[in-house]
Image: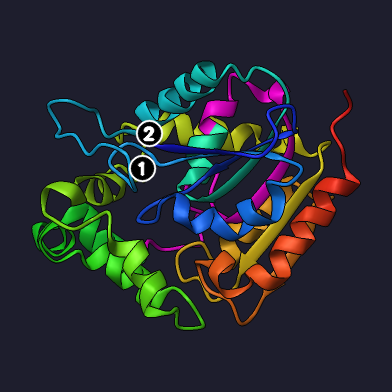
Amino acid sequence: MSFLDEGPRDGEVVLMLHGNPSWSFYWRHLVLGLRERYRCIVPDHVGMGLSDKPGDAQYRYTLQSRVEDIERLLEHLGIDGPITLAVHDWGGMIGFGWALKRRDLVKRLIITNTAAFPLPAAKPLPWQIQLGRDYNIGALLIRGFNAFAAGTIDQCVSNKVSPAVRAAYVAPYDSWKHRISTLRFVQDIPLSPKDKAWALVEEAGRTLGQYADRPAFIGWGLQDFVFDRHFLKGFTDALPKAEVMAFADAHHYVLEDKHAVLVPAIRRFLDAHPIPR
């Protein structure tokens, strides 16, 4: 597992978890805005970014494996104190899945276009996700043509990114072998109790309201067709005191579209809610 560890060793820890098909590169603006004061821990999940990309025989591409990876990373770094949990996309389920056994360590939340509960009943699974999850043609498009990583950075921003930024998002997924995780992530999305990740996702959703007494910041792109208003409502219902910045002109990669606004807002949020020593 590749990871960033930026900022003072004695700084308050901000654990930033990306989803699929991005990598730690998604968090770069926030790291640059925080690392002068805060210790930013930003892993690339196994199979993603600069981490190794093992085959199925060497690694179980499941939500539970991701949760265990975060536990091992923090043990490796000797971090057993307070944490600010920052999440995006499926990083929300990884982070809140990890926190099921470490809830007392999570003192603040930074939430961007993500989930910590099952697909809302009123929200149908988008056909683009279902294609990759359930059909061979979708798997071929993802692994053969890098359709998921390329399509997401092309379609899930409101403001077109530069060629260099686009290249950075797709660079880790440069071959059939290296795209295994972008497919396995989609295939692991739980929709019913028969799916492996269901119990973990359901429990995380059931306990989300227990964070309502902690400072929370929500930054949300309202143009996201996957993590849309249904998911935003799930968080605001569970965390009614959260500070919310929702943008009608931002998409799934909200930190691409709105980093100029969000990074200073998140920094102010963290500075205003210090973790007691």
Residue pictured at 26% horizontal, 36% vertical: 52
Height in image: 260 above or below 108? below
Res. 80 in view: yes
**Region in magenta:** 97-125
Amino acid type assigned to the residue bearing label 1 in the image:
Pro
- Which quadrant would the N terminus be assigned to in this image? top left
Q: Is residue 136 left or right of residue 34?
A: left
Label 1 belongs to which residue? 190
Judge whether residue 118 is colored magenta: yes
Height in image: 173 above or below 145? above
Q: As rendered, which of 172 and 130 lies closer to the eye?
A: 172
Q: Residues within 10 Å of mark 1 (few under 14, many from 20)?
A: many
In percent of width and height, residue 103 lies at 67, 24
What distance separates the C-alpha of mark 1 from that of mark 2?
A: 10 Å
In percent of width and height, residue 213 lies at 84, 36
Residue pictured at 32% horizontal, 36% vertical: 46
Q: Is mark 1 on a helix, strand or loop?
A: loop
Label 2 belongs to which residue? 63
